[in-house]
Image: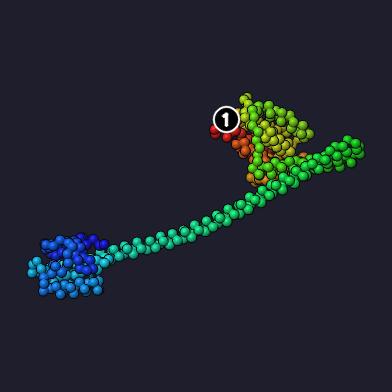
Amino acid sequence: MTDITKLEVKRGFILRCDTNGVVLSIERDDIGLELNPPFLFTRLIEYNSLTKALSFLADLHRTGTALNWELVLSNAPQVLHFSGILIQNELVIIASENSQETQKLFEELMVMLNEQSATLRTVIKEQQLESSLYDEISKLNNELVTLQRELAKKNSELEFLNKQKNQFLGMAAHDLRNPLHGILLQCDYLDAVIENTEHREIIGAIKEASNFMVTLIDDLLDYASIEAGSVHLEYEQVDVVKLVQNNIRINKTMAARNQLDIKLCFDTLKPVYTDPAKINQILNNLLSNAIKFSKEGQSIEVYVSDRDSAFELTVTDYGKGMSQAQQEKLFKPFTKGERGLHGERTTGLGLTIVKRIIDALGGTISIISEEGKGSTFRVRLPKTPPDLTAN
């Protein structure tokens, strides 16, 4: 409601009435009205002016405005000029001693109403804008919910297909393993009894291909098992330095074929709690890759370092090295690997499996490599299993 108390009345009054003409409040009074609200507006008017007062109220109620009506007050024989306006189901009546003053007050009231109307229009416009934005947000939210539902459905389907894929890989690899071992046994027998050089070369090629297939099948079985969420870990107290020494001793045989040397440097390290089989699997893969991509006569360096609550295994070679693009694809499964410098083939799964094993052990793996200068793989593993550390 408009604050009509701000209107200046020199000699007169301002009333707020309901649509029936009942005075609800006297907002301003410079004449000295003797009545207290509520009371009928007509009680203020002299008897002979009552008909005219009722016409004033009727006109005000009908048209919404009434201007400059002359009415006589009852408490003092005094003529006042009355104007009024209908605002939000209430009548605002202004009375003053002269018509100019009443007109001025009425015009001021209209200005105030126009300002309020402009403010009201602005508020309504803002509310409409907010409502429009709310509707748009609601629409987008509904679309998002639908997309999330579809995405969840697709993810469920993909998860089912992925499980089927892993089951197929596991079954196919398992069924191929036994025949391949049979082929390798037959090759060993033929290699022992055949003396013809050309025939022995053919048998050697068959053995090489079969050994590669066995490695690939072993990697497929490991990968299928890991993808199914079953990285089986068997923790025990392990002397890491001794384990690495034994592993290097085994891999030195393969390194010697390419005239490579493997050197070991280590810190004094107390026994840790880890899975020795998985540590050997990690080392075998890293050393195998280092041997494949090192030139004859070069050395491969292995470091065992103490790092407070963790230990590090570092394998460095000075061979072929890798580009940044090759490094970015290094741990992705089924990435086609390059042949080694001595013709060795790779399955494209070894480092992927290594990465998953390291993740399961709660560790990290990083690589520094430069083409033509070699590569360094650094594996950091906790001395105690993550679950046990958390407890």
Q: Is residue 381 left or right of residue 29?
A: right
Q: How many marks?
A: 1
Task: Tell me the residue at 24%/66% (across/down).
Answer: 90
Task: Tell me the residue at 64%/42% (across/down).
Answer: 229
> Residue 315 is drawn in which quadrant?
top right
Amino acid under disc 1? Ser
Task: Tell me the residue at 15%/61% (across/down).
Answer: 36
Please identify the quadrant where the C terminus is shown: top right
- Label 1 crowd (10 A; few <14 / some 14-19 / many >=20): few
> Residue 327 is drawn in which quadrant?
top right
Please identify the quadrant where the N terminus is shown: bottom left
Q: Is residue 89 left or right of residue 313?
A: left
Rendering coords of residue 337 (x, y %): 71, 45
Rendering coords of residue 133 (x, y %): 43, 60
Q: Nearer the viewer, residue 329 or 92?
A: 92
Mark 1 lies on residue: 309
Q: From what the image shows, is residue 136 above or below residue 191? A: below
Q: Is residue 97 left or right of residue 113?
A: left
